[in-house]
Every structure is written in structure tokens, then in C-alpha cells.
Image: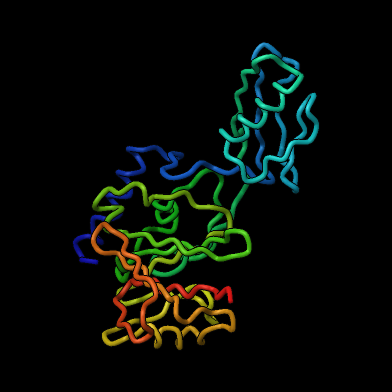
């Protein structure tokens, strides 16, 4: 990342936030979870108007319907679900409006090359740019990419972000919403990320001559479940993401590459 780009980054961050609004969500809707308070309005049925906190098991209690599971559903999905339930023998052509009245506190970890790394508590929808801003912005040693480690079911998913494409190129598709318990890492120059079936997934130095095998070794080797012949490299080339599948372990890596070691199913 050039020094000039680093100097203008805080200004660009601020311009993004002012232009698009603090609660703007660029990719994906906010998912409701335990602790959120949601309000439900059923038009022409004032007695069904309710304001309820989502329970620890992700349910809400709605008049006529009883307990309804809304955990990890977007507002549009909850609206569609309630509309279907009310229409099933209760109300003819129900018109429903649902909105989040209070957002629960969410904890996100941001590490690497930001001015104030650590745990950040969020209340309400927060995008990647907003999170970095809350962490004080990028520091002088920041690289060109970031990674978001996210739990999907019982698996860890890694989402690469091209900082130059996002901030300087205006690619808002990469300004994704940050989820509860995400771990965000802002890379430094000359760093790579190893994820999947290795002993210790994480970020490791990858200077000239570093191979996939060397990075795997730094990550404490393959696990017993690893598919050694199906390793992939995710590489940002300009504004495009290039996925190189089934690479040889002697393949040289470039800074900011993401090495993915999948699980073997045989």
C-alpha cells in the first residue's frame, strides 16, 4: 500500500460514512438474534401490535401465533414468515411491518494493522468500513488486504477484502456487514493467511521464495483431515479475485494470498 494511499484513507473512510449513512448495509441484511428488541405492526389490527425482545433461544411470542423462531433471520424474512403465519387462518391478506427497535450488543475482534486493535462492541448494523473506523483506522504498516474469519455452522469461513479496490476503487460489494463474533484481520505488507485443515490457521509472513508448503509448515502442518492435493490459493489481482485450485505444494505465493486447505471427504 502506498504512503499516499494511507494518508488519504481516513478521509475516504469519512466520506463513505457521510455519503451512505451510518446504518447503511451494503451486502446482506442485518440478522436478528437474542437480545434484539423488535416491533411488529399488523395494519388494521391494533390489538396485535407488539414490541418484544428476542429470547436466548431465538424466539419471540406473538399474539395469536405464540412462539415464533426468528433467530438469524433478516427483517424481510421475519416479515414474510409472520405474514404467512397470520394468513394461515387468522387474517385475510395481512399487511405487516417489522423493524428492530433496539439492537443487542455484539462483540467483534479486529486485529493486525489498525491503530486500536482489540475487541469492539457494536450496537446495530456495522459494515467493514465502519468497524475499521471504530478501530482508529489503518496504521502505517497496513497491507492491501483484510480477511474476515466467520463461523458458518461448525466451519470457519474466510472472506478476503481488497482494501484498495474497496476504498480507492469504490467497490462497495466488499463493504460487507460485520457479524457477531467475526474476527477481522488487517494484513501487513508481505503477509499471507492460511486457513482450513492446518494446525494453527492464521496470518504468516510470506516473503520472496515462500511456497505453499512452507506456509503450511508455519501453520503447524496439515491436520489428519486435510486434502493435500486440493489446496487453493485466493489471490486479489487488481479489482478481481482469482481462485487457483489444486495447486502444487511447491507453488510460490505472493503477499496477501489466502491459502485454503480443504477437508478430505475420503
- Residue farthest toward the front in the current orientation of the protein: 266
Give percent across and percent down for residue 241.
32, 61
- Residue farthest toward the top in the current orientation of the protein: 44
Give percent across and percent down for residue 88.
73, 23
Q: Residue at x 79, y 36 (%)?
A: 67
Closer to the camera, 216 or 129? 216
Color theme of the render: rainbow
Q: Can you say whether 18 is above or below 115 in the image? A: above
* Among the 4 quarters of the image, the one containing residue 108: bottom right
Total numbered circles: 0
Using residue 129 as the reference point, say whether residue 180 is left or right of it. right
* Quadrant location of the C terminus in the rendered image: bottom right
Closer to the camera, 205 or 222? 222
Give percent across and percent down for residue 176.
43, 50
* Among the 4 quarters of the image, the one containing residue 242: bottom left
Q: Can you say whether 89 is above or below 6 in the image? A: above
* Quadrant location of the N terminus in the rendered image: bottom left
Give percent across and percent down for residue 189.
30, 74
Q: Residue at x 40, y 53 (%)?
A: 133
Q: Residue at x 50, y 73 (%)?
A: 262
Closer to the camera, 229 or 90? 229
Q: Residue at x 57, y 61 (%)?
A: 151
Amino acid at each position: 500500500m502506498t504512503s499516499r494511499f494511507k494518508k488519504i484513507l481516513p478521509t475516504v473512510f469519512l466520506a463513505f460514512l457521510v455519503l451512505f449513512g451510518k446504518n447503511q448495509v451494503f451486502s446482506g441484511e442485518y440478522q436478528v438474534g437474542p437480545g434484539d428488541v423488535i416491533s411488529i405492526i399488523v395494519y388494521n389490527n391494533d390489538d396485535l401490535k407488539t414490541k418484544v425482545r428476542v429470547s436466548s433461544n431465538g424466539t419471540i411470542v406473538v399474539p395469536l401465533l405464540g412462539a415464533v423462531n426468528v433467530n438469524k433471520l433478516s427483517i424481510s424474512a421475519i416479515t414474510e414468515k409472520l405474514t404467512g403465519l397470520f394468513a394461515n387462518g387468522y387474517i385475510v391478506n395481512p399487511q405487516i411491518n417489522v423493524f428492530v427497535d433496539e439492537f443487542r450488543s455484539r462483540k467483534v475482534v479486529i486485529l493486525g494493522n489498525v491503530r486500536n486493535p482489540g475487541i469492539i462492541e457494536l450496537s446495530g448494523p456495522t459494515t467493514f468500513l465502519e468497524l475499521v473506523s471504530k478501530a482508529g483506522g489503518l496504521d502505517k504498516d497496513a497491507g492491501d488486504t483484510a480477511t474476515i474469519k466467520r463461523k458458518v455452522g461448525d466451519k470457519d469461513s474466510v472472506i478476503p477484502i481488497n482494501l484498495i479496490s474497496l476504498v480507492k476503487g469504490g467497490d462497495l460489494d466488499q463493504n460487507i456487514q460485520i457479524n457477531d463474533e467475526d474476527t477481522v484481520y488487517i494484513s501487513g505488507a508481505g503477509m499471507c493467511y492460511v486457513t482450513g485443515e492446518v494446525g494453527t490457521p492464521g496470518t504468516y509472513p510470506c516473503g520472496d521464495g515462500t511456497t505453499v508448503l512452507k506456509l503450511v509448515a508455519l501453520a503447524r502442518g496439515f491436520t489428519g483431515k486435510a486434502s493435500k492435493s486440493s489446496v487453493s490459493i485466493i489471490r486479489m489481482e487488481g479489482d478481481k479475485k482469482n481462485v487457483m485450485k489444486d495447486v502444487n505444494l511447491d507453488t510460490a505465493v505472493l503477499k496477501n494470498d489466502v491459502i485454503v486447505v480443504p477437508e478430505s471427504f475420503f
